[in-house]
């Protein structure tokens, strides 16, 4: 279980070789395990990998396989499989299905927020952004901005830094879409300060060209060379995909851990424990 958590952490850093090695160790230790939690997390891990590689249908099948396993696990459902599927539908361009999911869950930008539904509400913000990109309806981007601001405050109050990083990056894209350059760059700058601690790469890459543009603008405005920003920018090369195209996977396999970066340390192990606590 620990190896799976560490593998996910290294995937977030874009260190795919390390992530794959840790997953193989987890697979070797758990291949004969009948524990539902291992079987569930292994399928979710593989689904994430398949989605990054652009094999969306395979990822959806793996999530479907995980559903009956989850029914055997008596834990709070912090990251529902249906919300995970909605994120994949968005990457496939299947906005109508993602909208149907949101309607079925009765999600609203003005919902009362709680940690149990945080993943769903962040997913819903992604749906609102995708809908705005399709129909350019001003009220959709206004709803996305409002929801993300409330999610930001809730995540900060709860000390949920992983959620906060994702929320900040989505805020940057939302403010940029709304034409508010100053707020967009401020959100990216704050996200960089947060992501730098754990050297996260994948959350930035997953947002594709809009995030690349914002990173370049921020670097130009700061007029200084920041190693972490340069690392993020180099990870986008040589090709940059749209957010729906699974570009993080290709970039992930191009990114190498810097020589001065140690392997998983005590802090990383703590982070991995936090991951598996809620999966």
Image (cartoon, rainbow, N blue to C red):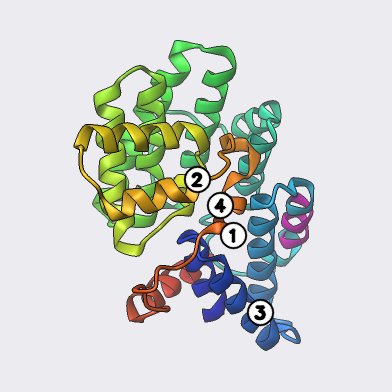
Residue at image mark 3: 24
Label 2 vs 1, first from the N-terminus: 2
Look at the numbered discs 3 and 4 and tell me whether their residues touch, using CB distance below 8 Å.
no
From the viewer's perspective, is the residue at label 2 or at label 3 nearer?
2
Where disc 3 sits, the SS reads: helix
Look at the numbered discs 4 and 1 and tell me whether their residues touch, using CB distance below 8 Å.
yes
Residue at image mark 4: 251
Residue, x 70% and y 55% (percent of image)? Answer: 50
Q: CA distance from mark 2 to mark 1?
A: 11 Å
Q: Is residue 102 left or right of residue 32?
A: left
Residue at image mark 1: 253
Residue 258 higher or lower than 60, as above or below: below
Whether the magenta-drawn stretch holds residue 65 is answered as yes
Label 3 vs 1, first from the N-terminus: 3
Q: Is residue 42 left or right of residue 32?
A: left
Query: What quarter of the picture does the N terminus occupy?
Result: bottom right
Look at the numbered discs 2 and 3 and tell me whether their residues touch, using CB distance below 8 Å.
no
């Amino acid at each position: 279980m620990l190896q799976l958590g560490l593998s996910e952490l290294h995937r977030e850093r874009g260190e795919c070789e390390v992530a794959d090695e840790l997953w193989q160790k987890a697979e070797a230790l758990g291949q004969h395990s009948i524990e539902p939690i291992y079987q569930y997390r292994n399928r979710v891990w593989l689904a994430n990998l398949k989605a990054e590689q652009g094999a969306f249908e395979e990822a959806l099948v793996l999530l479907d396989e995980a559903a009956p396993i989850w029914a055997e696990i008596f834990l709070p459902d912090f990251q529902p499989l249906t919300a995970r599927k909605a994120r994949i539908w968005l990457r496939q361009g299947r906005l109508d299905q993602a909208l149907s999911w949101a309607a079925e869950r009765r999600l609203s930008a003005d919902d009362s927020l709680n940690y149990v539904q945080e993943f769903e509400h962040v997913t819903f913000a992604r749906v609102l952004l995708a809908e705005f990109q399709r129909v350019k309806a001003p009220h959709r981007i206004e709803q996305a901005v409002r929801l993300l601001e409330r999610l930001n405050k809730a995540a900060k109050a709860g000390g949920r830094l992983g959620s906060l990083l994702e929320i900040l990056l989505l805020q940057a894209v939302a403010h940029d879409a709304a034409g508010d350059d100053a707020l967009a760059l401020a959100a990216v700058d704050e996200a960089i300060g947060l992501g730098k601690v754990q050297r996260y790469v994948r959350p930035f890459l997953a947002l594709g060209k809009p995030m690349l543009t914002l990173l370049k603008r921020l670097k130009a405005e700061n007029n200084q060379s920041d190693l972490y920003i340069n690392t993020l920018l180099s990870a986008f090369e040589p090709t940059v995909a749209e957010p729906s195209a699974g570009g993080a996977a290709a970039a992930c396999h191009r990114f190498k851990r810097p020589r001065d970066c140690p392997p998983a340390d005590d802090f990383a192990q703590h982070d991995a424990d936090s991951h598996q606590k809620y999966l």
